[in-house]
Every structure is written in C-alpha cells, then in structure tokens.
Amino acid sequence: MAALSNYFNLEEITTARKVSAAVINISGRQRMLSQRTAFFCMRLVGSENTAERATLRENLLEAIELMEKSHRDLINSDSTNLLSPPSPAVKAMYFEAPLYLDQQVCEYIDRIKALVQVPDGELGLENPHLAYIVRAAGGDLLAAFDAVVSQYQQESEIEQFEIDLKQVELYQESCAATSKAEAQAAEIDRALRELKQTQAQLLHSEKMSSLGALMASIVHEINNPVSFIYGNLSHAEIYTKDLLYLLRLYQEQYPNPSAEIKSQIQQMDLEFLVEDLPKVMSSMQMGSDRIREIVKSMGSFSRTDNSNMTLCDVHDSIDSTILILRNRLNSKIDRRDIQIVKNYGKLPPVECYAGQLNQVFMNLISNAIDALDEAAKNQPHAALKISICTELAGFDRVRVRIADTGSGITAEVKKRMFEQFFTTKAIGKGTGLGLSIVYKILVENHRGTLRCESEPSQGTEFIIELPMHQT
C-alpha cells in the first residue's frame, strides 16, 4: 500500500468520491424537503388544533432553514469545504432557462415563509401560497430537482470513470516502473555475480600462474645440477668398472700383498666394497632418473602460457599431474596407499591450452584423493583406488574418465557441484572454485563437456570429452 501510494493519490480519490456522493445526497435531500414541506403546509392549513399548528409552523421553519442552507451549499462552493464548484451544466439548470431552479427554490422558500406567517384564522385551502407550494412540490420544482439530481449522477459517473481510468493508467505505469526496477535489480545482481566469478577466476589464475612461474624457476635451478650429475654418472660407472677390473688383475697377479696392504684391505672391507659399489652406482642412477622424471613433469605442469593453443599429449599431462601429487597418494598414519589404475587408449595429440588442461586434471585428481581420504576415515578397510581411462569418443573427440572408490555424492550436491563457491568441505579445506573453474575451462574455453556420475556409497566418476581440434 505504501508503494502504491507513490503512484495513486488515495486521499485525493477518496475526497472526490465523498464530494460526488455528498452533492447527490444534498440534491436528493432538497427534493425530499420540498415534498415534506408541502405535506406540512397542507397539514397546517387543514389542522384545527392550535398546538399542532404551532408545532407545524416550527417544523416548517426548520425544514425551510435546512433547505435554504443546502441550496446555498450547492450553488456556492465557498460555503463549504466539502463541495467543489458546480459544473456549467448544473449552473445553467440553476440560473438559466428552462428550469431556473435557483429562482424556483427561492420563490418556494419565500412562499412557505409567507404561509407560516399567516394567522390561524386566515388559513384556508384557497390560500394562494398553499396553492403555489402544492403545485411546485408536485410539478415544476420536483421535475427540476429530479433533473439536477440526474445531472449530478451523470457527472459523478463520468468523474468516477475518469478516476478509474487514471488509476488504471497509474497502475500500468507502476507495473512498468516495477518491472523496470526488477529488471535493473536482476541485471545488477547478475553483473555482481559475474564480477565475483571473474575476480575469483582471476585470483585462481594468478595463483596458478605464480605457481607455474615458481615451478619453472625451480625446474631451471634443479635441471642444471641434475643434468651435470646425470651426465657424469655413466662415466663414473665406466670408471668404477675399470677400477674394479684393475683391482682384480692386481689380486690375480700379486696374490701375496705386503702386510700394510693386507691391513688396509681388512680395514676398508674390500670384499664388501667391491660388492656394494656397483649397487651404489645403480642406486645413484635410479635416483638421478627419478629426479629427471620429476623435473620433466614439473616442467610440463608449469606451462602457463594460455595465449595460444598447442598440441598436447593428454597422457603426458595426466602423468605429470600424478607425479606432482604422488606425495598425497602415499600411505599415511590413518590410511593405506592410494592405487592409481591407468587404462590408456591410443590418443592423438589434442589442441588445447596445456596449462589449463593441467589445472583440470590437478583439480579432479585432487578431489578424488580428498574423497578417498574421507572414505578411509569412515571405512578403514575400504578399497582406495583412482581409475583413469582414456579413449576415442568418435572420430574427432577424446574422452577421459577419472573415477574413485570414495563415498559418492548425493543428487542434491550433484545439482550444485559446478556452482561457484559451492563446497561440501569444511571451512578452510575448500573454496568452492575448483569444479566451477574446471567446468569453465572445459566447456567455455575448449568447447568440451564435463559430466559427473555418482551414487552414495558407489564412488564418483567425472567424464571429460574434448574436441581434437579447436579451429
């Protein structure tokens, strides 16, 4: 009601209705008074009771006074705060031919006043004032009052129609203004959501870019000394073999060494050294290969140039992600190792933003690990496995399936899982950005698809499909 009052002046409308009703009521009362006074006049003339005549004279004077006051109210707008000036049509009825209602009313009132002043002894049915009063109340004056009342009613109906029409117009304006305001509010709300989403994505991208830059720097710093070690290990292995061969020749050619040499052989446990040194070299080679593998994976994962698409090996991207996350896959105090089962099909290179694709696999595999951590708390002996399957999906698309053996998710969570900032993790454990960013990368940036299949206690599987070519 408060809102509508801004468009509808309810007080003004109510006052207009009151004025119209009051005018019609007064006009009707004038008509009634004319008939009533005529009846009193006839009783006054016909009565032979002095007391009754006195009472009738008083009643007539009161009625005439009321009639006179009502007449002034109708023709003079300044005489009351309730009535508005009469319309030109009504004024013509009062002051112009053929009705001359003002003249008739004044003459009627004067005749009644004159009749009231006639002494009792002179009152009779032949009195000219009585004849005029009876004739006017039942004829011309009554017809004039009926015409005025009818005119007021017509004007009231027209006025009410105009008010109703104005209400309709104002209501339409109100609805239009309300719709416009609601549309503006919805647009502002949408812009605010997009702004928050863009801000969150920029922050996430900045973090990934910083992480990629940091990893690239670490890779560069590690790669040089690792390459130096790796490149010299083969030579060290050859040298070691040659020295051990030379040592055996000495033992064969000089089977009886001096006491000092014998003492040194015993002190250094030469037999164990000869047996263990090849193993040490082999372990160093394995460690060097392992470091080179990690450096290679970090280098692959740290690609942050998303300005141009390149051909990417999906399997390399998955393997580098798994290698980065290997520490999370290892056993902990409260759970066993998480097993990674790979079932790779034969896939061609895929045109994509390599750094963004790494983000996709990082988020999905990390979520799978989180789900298995949670499942291990509730079921210590549950199978902890992540299965990754790749295959062709038609002649121009590839499909990647990442499934876990966790607790699964409910239908309600599935409906909202790709919403920004929606998370089922505890405060501080998740931001609700991972899956929304994954969805944006796959669907908006790569024209791909992402869907989830999951049932409570049945694990969860994310299915990715990407076109091989974007252009």
Image: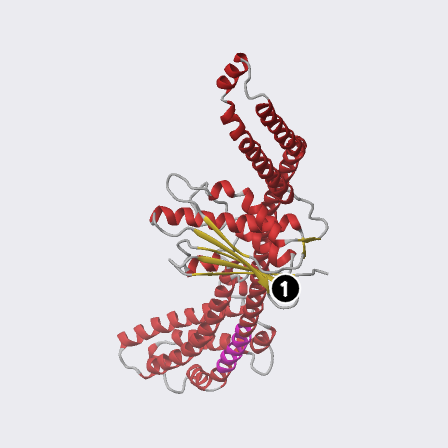
Magenta-drawn stretch, dominant element (helix, strand or loop): helix
Residue 185 percent across, percent down from the top left: 57, 55
Q: Is residue 400 above or below residue 261?
A: below
Check the image and report above or below for 268 versus 347.
above
* Range drawn in magenta: 145-160
Horizontally, residue 216 falls left or right of residue 332, namely right
Numbered-mark total: 1
Residue 32 inside the magenta-drawn segment? no
Q: Is residue 94 left or right of residue 428?
A: right
- Identify the residue at horizontal 42%, vertical 59% (top origin): 412
The residue nearer to you, when weighing 177 against 96, is: 177
User: Left of 174 or right of it: where is 225?
Assistant: right
Tell me if residue 1 can be seen.
no
Percent position (x, y) of residue 24? 47, 74
In the rendered structure, the answer to whether residue 442 lies left or right of residue 33 reads right
Residue shown at 39%/52% (left/top)?
Answer: 383
Q: Secondary structure at mark 1?
A: strand
Residue 39 lies, with reference to residue 406, above or below; the image says below
Residue at far top of view: 260
Res 390 quadrant in image: bottom right
Give the residue pinned by disc 1: 397
Q: Looking at the picture, tell me which residue is in the foreground, 91 or 238.
A: 238
**Residue 361 in view in this figure:** yes
- Disc 1 marks a residue whose amino acid type is Arg
